[in-house]
Amino acid sequence: MHAWVALCGVVAMMLSPAVRAEDRWISAWGTAQQLAPMPPPRMPPRPAGETRPAPPPSGPSPILPTPERLNDQTARMVVRPTVKGSVWRVQFSNASGGEPLRIGRAAFAKSAEAGAIRPGTSRALSFAGEGAVTIQPGAVVFSDPVALDVAALELLAVSIHLPDDVAVNTLHPLGLRTTYVVKGERTEDTTFANAETNRSYFWLSGLAVEADASAGTVVAFGDSITDGFGTTPDAGRAWPELLAERLQGDARTRHLSVINMGISGNRVRRDGAGLSALARFDRDVLARPGVRWVILLEGINDINFAAIPGMPASEAVTAADLIAAYSQFIDRAHLHGIKVMGATIAPTEGTWLYSAKTEALRQAVNQWIRSTGKFDALVDFDAVLRDPARPTRLNPTYDPGDNVHPNDAGNAAMARAIDIGRLRRN
């Protein structure tokens, strides 16, 4: 009798659509969530007696103010999936916790101008068959599958209605695409008149697409340089988006998506702007569906923040500390069958935190990245971005004025430097 029951269970599993071998998902878009509110990243005040000239202002911060709370409001957020697809799941996260989040209604559609959506493309989202969902503190939910034919790099809009008074405590502040907020339940409205705007993603953390066995995801994992801090908003000029365009432009790599897991101000070893890279690696890389590669670019904030005068000794960092952390990323990724491309750290001379000590630390870390052999591949962003006449500084062509964050041209150079053939050969 027991054998018969077991056999019936196996047959049922084989026939169940939920476990079909072809029912496979990859990440098509994503963003790393963090605790809110978070002010724009700024260098700390200059100490008394500092004589080096301050870098010229690089213009207004791309991080716009966000509401502290939402109450009976609809937020419409624009995303850009990096591969085509026909069946999708939307991922929401209440990672920072604090209180349960209730989404009363959510919808998914093709985006148009100024917060509008294309008529006839809106699809209501459900969660285990229900139109509403409550996400407990620290939890993640995926919507049920929804059908919509979408081209690679086509803009989509995800709209959520927050029926209750809720603190905006989990978001990605530097979304670099305009988000629209209106009063009431407006998730399927074609236009959003008189909307308030910002550039943050509220609780929205990913988009998965049903894909075949050849498909996979590349995760760009890093800090503000990966996040796109120095790039033009609403233009898709951060290097991960430009890498996605390269992949889609080559028939041999169109099966690969790219998701941006950068957080401005993030550090490798310690919390600050979001959890440390070591602490969030599971959530932002290993838990994402379909990941094949990680491009790792982190460390300059550990180096520079430790150089702030008056920082406690516990904030100090050595090359050995960072190398040990990088080794952990590689080992943990390999346990999941994921390969890692190491990226060297670009120069920052011109900031008042720069010194011979910080430069020596950066050089030591970069030398290890170039020579270790532990990484599965290498991209030398330092060589790409540095000034040939003064290699401890950014190339002036790529410097928006803050001596740290590459501009649109610099991000384009970074995307061009990545060997996409290496990504193809998994």
Image (tube, grey):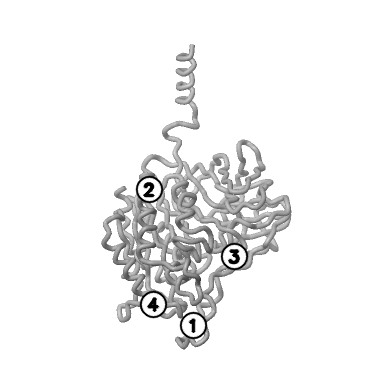
Residue located beneath label 2 in the image? 292
User: Element type at marker 2?
Assistant: strand
User: Element type at marker 1?
Assistant: loop
Rendered location of residue 183, percent (x, y): 72, 57
Q: Which numbered tag is attached to residue 56? A: 1
User: Element type at marker 3?
Assistant: loop
Question: Closer to the camera, 92 or 349?
Answer: 349
Which numbered disc, 2 or 3, marks the residue that appears first in the sequence?
Answer: 3
Q: Which numbered tag is attached to residue 411? A: none
Which numbered disc, 4 or 1, marks the residue that appears first in the sequence?
Answer: 1
Q: CA distance from mark 4 to mark 1?
A: 15 Å
Q: Which numbered tag is attached to residue 38? A: 3
Of badges 2 and 3, nearer the viewer stands: 3
Q: Which numbered tag is attached to residue 397? A: 4
- For residue 268, which quarter of the picture? bottom left
Which numbered disc, 4 or 3, marks the residue that appears first in the sequence?
Answer: 3
Question: Closer to the camera, 13 or 301?
Answer: 301
